[in-house]
Image (tube, rainbow, N blue to C red):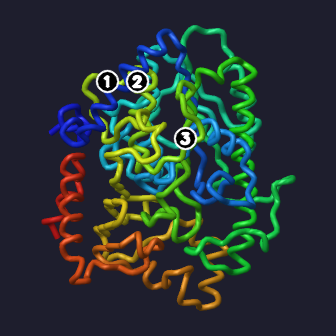
Amino acid sequence: MKYYWGRRQFLKTVGLGAASLVASRFAFAQQHPGQSRNVLLYVVDDHGTDDAGCYGNPVIKTPGLDALARKGTRFTHAFCTTASCSASRSVILTGLHNHATGQYGHQHGYNHFVSFPHIKSLPVLLAGAGYRTASAGKYHVAPEEVYRFQQYIKANGRSPAQLADDCKQFIAAQDDSPFFLYFCTTEPHRPFRREGSDTFDPKDVIAPRYLPDTPACREELAKYYGSVQRADKGLLRLIEILKQTGRWNDTLILYISDNGIAFPGAKTTLYDPGMRLPCVVRNPYASKKGIVTDAMITWADVTPTILDFAGALPDKPEFHGRSFLPVLEQQHPQGWDEIYASHTFHEITMYYPMRVVRTRRHKLIWNIAHKLDCPFASDLYASATWQDILKRGETVYGKRTVDAYIHRPKFELYDLQNDPHEINNLADDPDYIETLEKLKRKLARFQERTKDPWVLKWKYE
């Protein structure tokens, strides 16, 4: 069986969307012959959707991302497919769900998850198409022979702005080959810290409704806000460098986060705070700017999109995602109304496979190991926010009970229109039997198409 987005299945599944992709590739190549097509993929660590100026937060200052949104396209429905660092990055760099890459969880230390040796990654494919490739900052995937870059630019501490300066020579190199720069900040990952002017009074932060509005949580959010601003300074500096070096007018820029904010209830979960993320894309050759689109995309779409822009999309692509380049100038494109997610591990001690199908209206979460307590990432468990809840013996965390957070049913079905915070599980509601069964069938077909080993669990155990 070919991967889901093999050409035949691609055309069959998305119809007009696929036709528009072919037309877009032809039009792009015709309209911009000989144009250099540089790519900057800017990936931050644990940045939530609502935590930027262009996404409606009036407190955090993100001039870099806001400027990018004015010149490009801001997505309102962009999702990671697994809310864990290494696993998510494997999806970003391959266009395949992590159950197909083998990068089921963390790469570093004793976790030791690695991708299969046969996987063809984005930097390898671009290098084969004549690109200069460099990885700057956080890497966090393995093995290197699968995710090989021609150059590695190491982070200088936790300063994204300094790391951007360290990339200037690579960007400005007098070389006829286009470049691909994979720029990854450590910010705003824990441990949060106060630094310089990027400090906030806890009373000024906006506590999301899925988090407890407590002094401990506000104190951590205040530090997190500062980390977000430092991450943005790296983007702002790179924009300046691109303009100084004459690369601004031919560089595709994508800004995404690997997963949601590092608080219980977001990161490592497939509730929307864990997987619905910021995504701003600026195509230098787009005729429309400042677009806000509701196209539902995932990080499995990133690699096909970049290869499409580069003119290097294989004739028979076997990605799980598809290029969203054709819809960057469309507010409400057809055929972009459904996404899937696949999470298995975070740390090696955190086995908790979940599979998700999400439409505009509904989300179904299948907790495959539902008989186990939902495990905590070590840093989230140790967070002042969670420890404060335990110390005070609270039974409610944000809008969800502590027990509901730890003990989850086999299926969770939510009506996102009436219940955007995913609190009222409708899986056992007789009025939703038809919806539940329909989404279960969709999920099983997705697993079959993407060769998910956990598809056996529908019949086994």
Disc 2 packing (10 Å; few <14; some 14–19; many ≥20): some
Taking the image as shown, residue 330 lies to the left or right of residue 19, namely right
Q: Mark 1 and mark 2 in contact (Cβ < 8 Å)?
A: yes
Q: Amino acid at mark 2?
A: Leu
Residue underneath mark 1: 314
Q: Amino acid at mark 1?
A: Pro
Taking the image as shown, residue 416 lies to the left or right of residue 430, namely right
* Residue drawn where x is 55% and y is 74% of the image: 210
What is the spatial separation of the Cα atoms under label 2 and label 1, in whole angstroms? Answer: 9 Å
In the image, residue 151 above or below residue 396: above
Q: Amino acid at mark 3?
A: Thr
In the image, residue 71 above or below residue 450: above
Circle on res. 125: 2
Residue underneath mark 3: 73
Q: Which secondary structure lies at badge 2? A: helix
What is the spatial separation of the Cα atoms under label 2 and label 3, in whole angstroms? Answer: 25 Å
Taking the image as shown, residue 6 lies to the left or right of residue 72, namely left
Nearer to us: label 2 or label 1? 1
